[in-house]
Structure formats: C-alpha cells, structure tokens
Image (cartoon, grey):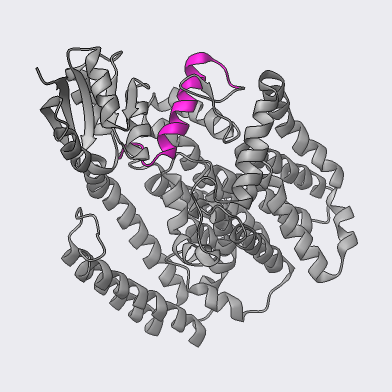
C-alpha cells in the first residue's frame, strides 16, 4: 500500500519541526559557559548525583540543597551521560523540554483544528523568545512548562473526545501533573487547579469537575509522592522546613531571597516572552472564543495573575503562559487579513524600530554590553520593520509566520555562533578553567575577593568547589600568614582595594574580562 499524501505531509511537518527544534534549542547549547548564580549550582547538584549515585538528596558540594525538586537534576544526569560533564549536558533537560512542548502543541492543534493550524501554532511556540531563551538555560522553568503543557494538551483531548479513549487522556494528564510536581513542587498542581477551577466557575458548571476523573489524582501522587516521602525519611524535618516553608511559602509571601519586583512586573515580561508574536494578541482578543479557547485563556492568565501577587518575581515564573498563548495566536495566521491584524503587525514593526534606535543610537547611555555593533542593530531592525510593514499591507498573515520564524532562526544561530562566545569571556567563569589549571593544581584552593554571586558559583563549578571567597582585607592578611603565597581572583574595582592594603603585595599573572588573577603574599 502506497503512503497517502496526508502521510507524506505529516512526515514532512515532523521533519521540519525536528529541524526547527534542533536549530533553536540544541544548536550552540554549550557555546557559552554557565551563566548567573543558578546555572552553575543546578549543574553542580546534578553532577554530584552522578558521581555519588545518590538520586534522593540533592547536594551542592556535599551539603543538602533542598531549594528545588529533583526532576531537572535527574534529566541533567542523563544529559551528562550523553554529552559528558558539560554545559550542553546541564542544559539538556531544558532543550528536550522545549522540543517536547513544540510537538505537543503541534499534536494538539492538529487534533483540534487541523494539520495547517497545528503546524502554525507549533511554529509560534518554537519561535517565541521565551521558548528558545529558556531552552538554553539550566533551570527548572522550561521543564515545568513542558509538564504543564502536556497536562493541558491531554486535558483538551479529554474534553473533546466522547469515546472511551478519554480515560486514557485523563490518566495521561494526571501523570503529567505528577511530573510537574517533581519539576518544581506544589505549584505544578496548584496552577492547573486554579485554571480549571476558574474556567468551570465562570461557565456556571462547577459540578462538571466530577467528569474529570478526580480519582486520577492518585496517579499524580503515585508519580510525585515517592521522592518526597524518601527525601523526608532520609533528611527529616530539615527537608520539610527548607523546601515547603522557606522555598515555597516564604518565597511567595515575601522577597526574602531578593527577588522583589513591582506588581505589574510580569506585563513587560509577558510581552518579551511571546515576542515577536506579542501584538497578535490584539487580533486574538477580537475573535469569538469557543470553550477550548476559554480553557487556553485561563491556563495563560492564572500564572500571570497568581505570580503578580508573589513577593518574589522572576521572568521564568510565567513561562508556562507561552504554550497556551501560542495555541491562541497561531490560529490567527490562517485567518484573512483584517484591520486589527494590520495594526498588530504595525506595532511589531514599530517595536523593531524602537529597539534599533534604543540600542543602536543610545547603547552607551543604556550601558549595553559592547559585543554587538550598534550601527548593525539599527540597520537590521529598520530593514525588518520595513519588511513587516510590507507584509501587513500586501500579504496574507501566513507569510508573517514564515518571516518571523526565519528572523528568529537567524537571530539564534547568529547569537550562538558570534555573540555568545564574546559574552563567554566577560559573563561566565568558564574561560578561567584552563589558565587556573596551569597556575595551581586541581586540588588547590583559589581565593576570590568580594566576588559577584555569578562569579563565585561559576568558579566553584569549574573548580569543583576548590574556591573560597574572602570579603575583608583582614581575612586576606590572615590567609597569607599560613602560606608563602596564595592565588586570588578579583574584579577591577576590588583589585585596586587589595593593592591598597599596606601589609600585602601582589603579582598579576592573568586577566580575562573584568577579572584578574594574582599571587598574593605579605610584604617582607
């Protein structure tokens, strides 16, 4: 039997989405060292799990670390088996999760609306800035997003399938919630519960929840419960206090961990995460919503509103809104052109011009990192703005999808090939790995004087914790009393402070970016 044209089409779409996912999520995955304070910590915890064989208690350099559940660490351990102990291995869970989101969204759109719609909603999801940005980050946000997207997709299948197969979709949805709880804790169940609860109450059919197979929560518990139980048995009350009280309740009710932001913080974050498709939400708002659209809207709005009330706010908190919004936005690309659609594209074009002027002309005022030419940014954004205007006036919306996708792919490949390696020298500690190996043995301590958190955690990862931080000149003097000389690292500002200590002398041996390595010894 010969394959039908429909089968050929499915295979082609699958191949295109696979190539797209590779280009956006896996290409250049290790082109920059571990960034910020979180990436090196999470990567180190996963590495320690592999080295010790203990997959129950997360540990950071031997000490229990109960900030997050283990699913990301477990998958990073798989990444290490594939890529070795590398940045690509640490980021593998996020890249895999982003790919899973793309195919889940395609499957959902295809099943609910058709093959073309399925492809376009997957295209929107893949090329939204939030997707590929967090796919390149060793964090829990993309993993939680994938789990919640799976729960959403399987719930929609349940809601639209009157056959006995709906029980299979129900169980798959509850299983996805179990993985979400292992990805980031109770919020993995709380957000879907609030979303579906709001959807049900708004329709005045609150008894409808009985048709959702509530006994399936036992599946959620069976998947997520064992780790929480074993970790409590092994670590006792310490785990319960730190994980549930400190890092869930206190993190939500206060800014105790230094992430306080204004109430409306997530509105500009939302615009950025969904860019370049953001302004099509205006076109989405004008159409008549069906019940599936209402579910998607609730799934997107609840994280946005819920975390706006949180005392701690980080951009990744609302990453789960991207897939449901992609399902809403992608359908607009198969609609006829309209005045509202053209206004949305004009706004996208205006935003591109604004970005060009802001970073191309006022880059120095904005303290932009000088790794990219401001003139080049200005030229590219003006050309893109002109193309967008032409697309809005003369062409169908589907061509906007092709243009945005091509532009984002070009941006990601350019960044991974040309931009990230430059940031690697100034914003990560990876370049210090080899120079320090030439200066001291791997088991010797390197001291850092008043380091930034990202530098401290970064060098701890690349030196396997053979790093100690010093925060006063008295402590510097103390460590030189027990050794002839010690190797230290400091940034330009604190280096001047060290050179001003009258009892100490130094010999500069290496510099990378804003940091300098020097031998420190007492004045004779």
**Between 399 and 424, which is closer to the camera in this rendering?**
424
Residue located at (40% from left, 74% from top): 348
Q: Picture coordinates of residue 272 (x, y %)? A: 44, 63
Question: Is 458 drawn above or below residue 347 in the view shown?
Answer: above
The percent coordinates of residue 110 (x first, y second) are 61, 58
Q: Quadrant of residue 159?
A: bottom right
Q: Main secondary structure of the magenta part?
A: helix
Above/below status of 468 relative to 358: above
Horizontal relation, residue 362 to residue 465: left or right:
left
Q: Quadrant of residue 342?
A: bottom left
Q: Is residue 501 left or right of residue 254?
A: left
- What's the residue at 49%, 61% (across, down)? 124
Residue at 28% x, 14% y is 444
Instruction: Name the quadrant of the N terminus.
Output: top right
Query: In the drawing, does residue 509 fall left or right of residue 292?
Result: left
Q: Quadrant of the C terminus?
A: top left
The picture places residue 109, in percent across and down from the top left corner, at 61, 59
Q: Is residue 146 visible?
A: yes
In the rendered view, would you say 375 is above or below 321? below
Residue located at (59% from left, 50% from top) = 104
Magenta-drawn segment: 32-55
Tell which of 509 and 404 is nearer to you: 509
Q: Is residue 52 magenta?
A: yes
* Residue 479, percent from left and from top: 27, 19
| Magenta stretch contains residue 224 | no
């Amino acid at each position: 039997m010969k394959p039908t044209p429909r089968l050929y089409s499915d295979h082609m779409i699958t191949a295109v989405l696979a190539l797209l996912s590779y280009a956006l999520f896996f290409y250049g995955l290790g082109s920059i060292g571990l960034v910020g304070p979180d990436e090196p910590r999470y990567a180190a915890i996963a590495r320690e799990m592999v080295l010790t064989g203990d997959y129950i208690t997360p540990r950071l350099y031997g000490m229990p670390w109960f900030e997050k559940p283990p699913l990301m660490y477990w998958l990073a351990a798989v990444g290490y088996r594939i890529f070795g102990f590398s940045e690509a291995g640490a980021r593998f869970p996020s890249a895999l999760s982003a790919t899973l989101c793309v195919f889940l969204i395609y499957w959902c759109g295809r099943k609910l609306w058709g093959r073309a719609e399925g492809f376009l909603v997957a295209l929107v999801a893949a090329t939204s800035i939030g997707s590929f940005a967090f796919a390149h980050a060793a964090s829990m946000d993309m993993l939680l997003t994938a789990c919640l997207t799976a729960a959403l997709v399987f719930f929609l299948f349940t809601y639209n399938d009157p056959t006995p197969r709906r029980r299979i979709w129900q169980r798959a949805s509850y299983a996805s919630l179990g993985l979400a709880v292992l990805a980031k804790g109770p919020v993995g169940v709380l957000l879907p519960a609030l979303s579906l609860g709001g959807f049900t109450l708004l329709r005045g059919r609150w008894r409808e929840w009985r048709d959702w197979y509530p006994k399936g929560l036992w599946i959620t518990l069976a998947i997520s419960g064992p780790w929480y139980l074993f970790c409590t048995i092994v670590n006792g009350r310490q785990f319960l206090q730190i994980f549930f009280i400190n890092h869930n309740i206190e993190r939500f009710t206060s800014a105790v961990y230094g992430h306080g932001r204004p109430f409306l913080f997530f509105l500009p974050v939302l615009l950025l995460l969904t860019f370049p498709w953001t302004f099509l939400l205006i076109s989405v708002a004008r159409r008549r919503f069906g019940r599936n659209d209402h579910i998607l809207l609730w799934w997107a709005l609840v994280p946005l509103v819920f975390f706006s009330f949180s005392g701690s706010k980080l951009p990744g908190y609302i990453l789960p809104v991207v897939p449901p919004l992609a399902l809403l936005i992608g359908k607009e690309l198969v609609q006829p052109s309209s005045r509202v659609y053209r206004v949305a594209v004009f706004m996208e074009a205006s935003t591109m011009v604004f970005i060009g002027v802001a970073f191309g002309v006022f880059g120095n005022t904005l303290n932009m990192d000088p790794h990219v030419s401001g003139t080049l940014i200005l030229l590219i954004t003006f050309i893109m703005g002109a193309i967008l205007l032409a697309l809005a006036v003369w062409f169908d919306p589907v061509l906007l999808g092709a243009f945005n996708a091509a532009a984002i792919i070009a941006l990601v490949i350019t960044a991974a090939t040309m931009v990230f390696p430059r940031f690697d020298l100034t914003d990560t500690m990876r370049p210090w790995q080899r120079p320090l190996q030439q200066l001291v043995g791997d088991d010797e301590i390197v001291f850092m004087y008043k380091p930034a958190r990202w530098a401290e955690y970064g060098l701890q990862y690349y030196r396997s914790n053979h790093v100690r931080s010093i925060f006063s000149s008295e402590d510097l003097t103390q460590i030189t009393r027990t050794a002839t000389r010690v190797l230290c690292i400091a940034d330009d500002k604190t280096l001047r402070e060290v050179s001003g200590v009258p009892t100490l002398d130094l010999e500069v041996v290496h510099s990378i970016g804003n940091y300098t390595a020097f031998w420190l010894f007492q004045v004779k």
